[in-house]
């Protein structure tokens, strides 16, 4: 077995979700879950089929984001993994809907951070072992940091008052 890291290639501000599912129906079900939950969100998704023709299956409502999802899926190349890239919304807007899609087994990350996927490669294929999401902590927040965090969440409308 060989362990490799695969960087997710995307613009710095772009959020994405990386997960694993188990069936070709995932592509259509994820698409429906996203447009039903966040109709104004632009997105592209790609799913790595793990049997049959073993194709990357794609969908979305934004060609550029579909292209980013497709290209990253081809790089990660792990069976039954999926990637969703989004604009005009955040993972928190659709994460529960995505997790509730019956085919979805797990979510590895939901982030805009620089991310590397740790992949195990064997003669039988490739699998996701984990992810590196962003940077390590540099300390513990102080009172000013708490105020800044709370102000930020209220400014973007995620908390009231």
Image: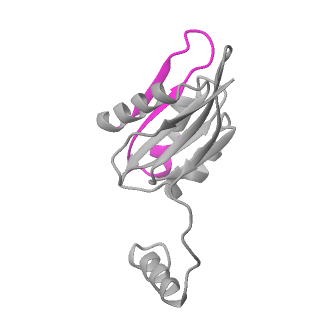
Is 47 magenta? The answer is yes
Q: Nearer the viewer, residue 95 or 113?
A: 113
Q: Nearer the viewer, residue 130 or 107?
A: 130
Residue 68 in percent (x, y) is at 37, 35
| Quadrant (top left, top right, bottom left, bottom right) of the N terminus | top right
- The answer to whether residue 160 shows anywhere in this view is no
Residue at 45% x, 56% y is 90
Is 147 magenta? The answer is no
Q: How many marks?
A: 0
Residue at 37% x, 33% y is 66
Residue 35 in percent (x, y) is at 45, 44
Q: Is residue 146 above or below residue 17?
A: below
The residue segment tinted magenta is: 33-61
Residue 45 in percent (x, y) is at 45, 35
Q: Quadrant of residue 23?
A: top right
Q: Is residue 51 left or right of residue 56?
A: right
Q: Nearer the viewer, residue 89 or 113?
A: 113
């Amino acid at each position: 077995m060989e362990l490799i890291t695969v960087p997710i290639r995307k613009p710095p501000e772009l959020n994405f979700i990386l997960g694993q599912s188990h069936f070709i129906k995932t592509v259509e079900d994820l698409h429906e879950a996203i447009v039903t939950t966040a109709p104004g969100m632009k997105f592209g998704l790609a799913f790595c089929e793990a049997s049959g023709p073993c194709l990357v299956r794609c969908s979305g409502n934004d060609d550029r984001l579909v292209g980013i999802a497709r290209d990253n899926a081809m790089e990660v190349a792990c069976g039954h993994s999926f990637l969703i890239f989004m604009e005009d919304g955040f993972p928190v807007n659709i994460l529960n809907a995505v997790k509730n899609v019956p085919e979805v087994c797990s979510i590895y990350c939901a982030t805009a951070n620089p991310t590397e996927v740790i992949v195990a490669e064997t003669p039988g294929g490739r699998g996701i072992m984990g992810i590196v999401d962003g940077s390590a902590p540099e300390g513990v927040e102080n009172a000013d940091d708490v105020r800044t965090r709370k102000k930020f969440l209220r400014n973007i409308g995620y908390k009231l008052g």
